[in-house]
Amino acid sequence: MSSEPKTLTDCVLKQICVNLILANNLSKPEWIDALPITHAVQHQLKRMQASAAEFLEIYDFILRKIDVCAAIHIQDGVVKADATFQNLYNKKVLSLKRFHLLTIACGNEELYRSTQALLDKPTIDTREGQWEAHEKELLMTAKNIYFLEQFNVSIELDGCLNFLELYVLKFVDFGWMDGFKFLIRIIRKRENDYTHMLDSVIKYIFDKTVKSGKKWIRAFNAEASELIEKCVWRQNGRTYEDMKPYFEALGRRELERRCEKLRRKIEDPKVGKMVEDLVKFLAE
């Protein structure tokens, strides 16, 4: 079944979005300011336009080949990648295999599981068909997700974790935030089974998000705040200045809540250091 907008506002925004795509006008929001409409409506239009521009940019490797207009799905005022890809699959524009891979990039685990169950094999041969570079990254990601979930505790499990770390970092470069969060959740499902690799993997991902901006730090924190505390913040060698971008991204209210929570464990020397860092930052 196709995904269609569920509200009148989303229906109107979808038609405007389609018109903007056809007019190649997604990168020029200035026209919105000239419209005789309220600031609230201007904000809605700019939000939709920005989401559509980002969607077409980060999935250009697949969308440049197809007419996406009829399949665009707007929900809560923004383009939804997973529902749009579902529409393209339903219209037989995307094969099952490509749709399966794109569910990883857009981070929809339910669609990932359902499409995986429909495939003849849990993994896909990279030699099969003409795969774009980004698709090959997704192919290898799919294979390593499958093996990560199948292997017993062993060096092979750590090997899968190492590969998934590489793809997590690449997903940041590609701008696939929902896919990034999906991979963090996949990694965490077996966080008690890795022999020794998890600490270093979390450190590398943390450092990547710090370099990539606040929205990536917040996304990582939303999925793995405890691991950031355990594997990064508490570790020797991590200074206040190293952690300051993390504090700035989370914001004062979240830090005050975290500080209160940590004070209950103040007897742990490493927790004491964390509280000192937070008190120092909040006092600045």
Image (tube, grey):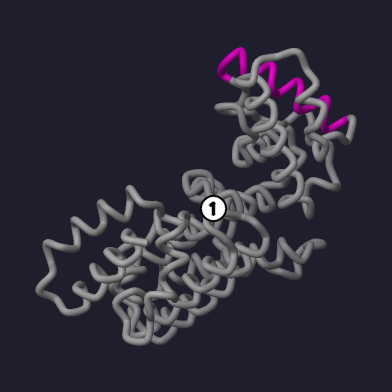
Q: In this view, does 110 lie above or below 229?
A: above
**Residue in the image at 61% along x and 63% along y:** 171
Which quadrant of the figure contains the C terminus? Answer: bottom left
Residue 221 locus on image (x, y percent): 40, 59
Residue 31 visible in the shown view: yes
Q: Is residue 172 magenta?
A: no
Residue at the front extreme of this rendering:
284
Compare residues 56 and 43 and report the one nearer the observer. 43
The relative height of residue 100 versus residue 84 in the rendered view (above or below) is below
Asked whether the viewer can see residue 10, the reply is no
Count how many numbered circles sit on residues in the image.
Answer: 1
When asked about the image quadrant of residue 259, the answer is bottom left
Q: Mark 1 points at which residue?
A: 116
Q: Position of residue 198 (x, y in %)?
A: 38, 78
Q: Which quarter of the figure has residue 17?
A: top right
Identify the magenta region: 6-22
